[in-house]
Image (tube, rainbow, N blue to C red):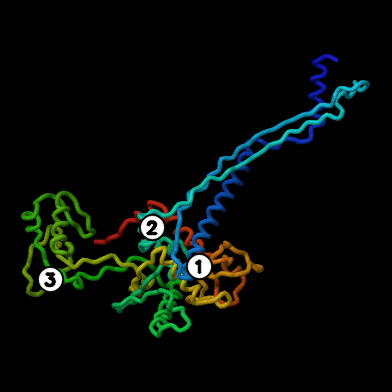
Amino acid sequence: MSFKLMFGAALGALSLQGCASIGNLGASGVAENIEGNAATLNDAHTRAMTSIIAMNVLRARDRWPTNYTTLSGIKSNPTLSLNGSASFSPLGLGNANSPFVGSSANVSRNESANAEYSVNPFSNNDKTQGLLKPIQPEQLENYWLAGWPRETLMWLFVDAVTFEGEAQPWYIDGDEFSAVPSPADAANTARYVQIIERAKAGRVDFGELPEPSLDARHCSPYDPVYLRETLGGATGNVDGGGNRGGGMTETIRTVEALTGRQLVLSEDPRTRAPNEAVIAPDRFNRRLLLCDTVDTEWGFMDSATGAPLAKIRTRSFDDMIYFLGETLRSGTEKEPTVAGGVILFQTYNERGDHAFAVRVEHAGRVYFIAPQTPLGDSAGPKDVTGNVLSLLNQLYLLAQSDEFLRAPEARIR
């Protein structure tokens, strides 16, 4: 038999008697592999960060120190290899019609994807700014406008409330959920829950509170001619919106630094006392005043009238964790703490028939943290653990970003 004939017969044997086949290696197959890898790695990243959050809530419950790490994005470098082999039986006598009977061939495809990531402690700068400083009120406003559940936002974000007409703030630190709360805590909790219920009904808004009137800021006149001709004389302007330009900017900053007060242009004639000397206004009939400084305040307002109901101070991320730890300490697995009609955080010692978002081990015990009350299950208070975990996960991601750490400071002039 010629070599060509034998080679052709061998190829025929491989094609007819091969014991494996290669799958689809086209664009569609590659896309499916990438899709599956991306979804798997994304799920792993989310579960890892949620476990870190849940672990710290349990540590806060037991008064252990919290500890956070930064988890880099997980990447994968998939590899694909093709392997083939063939074995041929010796050419026997008398079997010229099928000389490769007993021969075999196989082709296989091997895929591997090794995930790469890093877990590092927060740097001192990031920890101070991203975890321990109060979260910017703008973040709460963003979630509020996005339609997140009001009870989740108001319990988790708000550290202290100063009700309208009162000077002293009420601190929401978890003591109000103890077995025997103080009378003041019980009364203030009821007032706060009432605001939450009104917010859920669309009758309360969150945002920047109106600034106090100029009369309340103890304003006194300041001569714009003196400011212009004596303290610099450069061109520039100060308008009612606080816009400054030219060489006047440094002059105004100097005046405010020296006096500890704020320069304001106003058209309000009520700011002139009866015996006050008349100082010529500028060409826009505005008067330059030195007033007590004010900080931008945030809080809850009546949706219909805009009247302030309460001003608030926001929590830091770490304070959110400790607050949830306090709620866990105040309750039990069978009787969790109910905050304003909802369960903010709940754990289980057994999986049972529940669906769970995360499983963590702490102090030698395993805890299962449930997503939240299943749809249609209205018995008892609503469990919003799923909403809380989702919100904390997003804030934890933001705490690791430069944009979050450099959140702008809002100031209305």
Q: Distance between the residues labelled 3 and 1?
A: 59 Å
Asked if marks 3 and 1 touch (Cβ < 8 Å), the reply is no
Q: Label 3, label 2: how many angstroms apart (C-alpha)? A: 49 Å
Comparing 220 with 111, the one in front is: 111
In the drawing, what numbered circle is on residue 58?
1
Q: Can residue 248 be seen in this view?
A: yes
Q: Which of 318 and 210 is in front in this view?
A: 318
Neighbor class of circle 2 (other Cα within 10 Å; few <14, some 14-19, many 20+) is some
Amino acid type of the residue that numbered disc 3 sits on in the rendered structure: Arg
Task: Assign a secondary structure to mark 1.
Answer: helix
* Sooner in the amino-acid sequence: mark 2 or mark 1: 1
Above or below, 355 against 343 in this view is: above
Q: Is residue 23 left or right of residue 265?
A: right
The foreground one among 24 and 103 is: 103
Q: Which of marks 3 and 2 is nearer the N terminus?
A: 2
Per the image, the residue denoted by label 2 is 127
* Crowding at mark 3 (Cα within 10 Å: few <14, some 14-19, many 20+): some
Q: Which of 6 and 373 is in front in this view?
A: 6
Q: Residue at x 42, y 79 (%)?
A: 189
Camera-near label (3 vs 2) is: 2
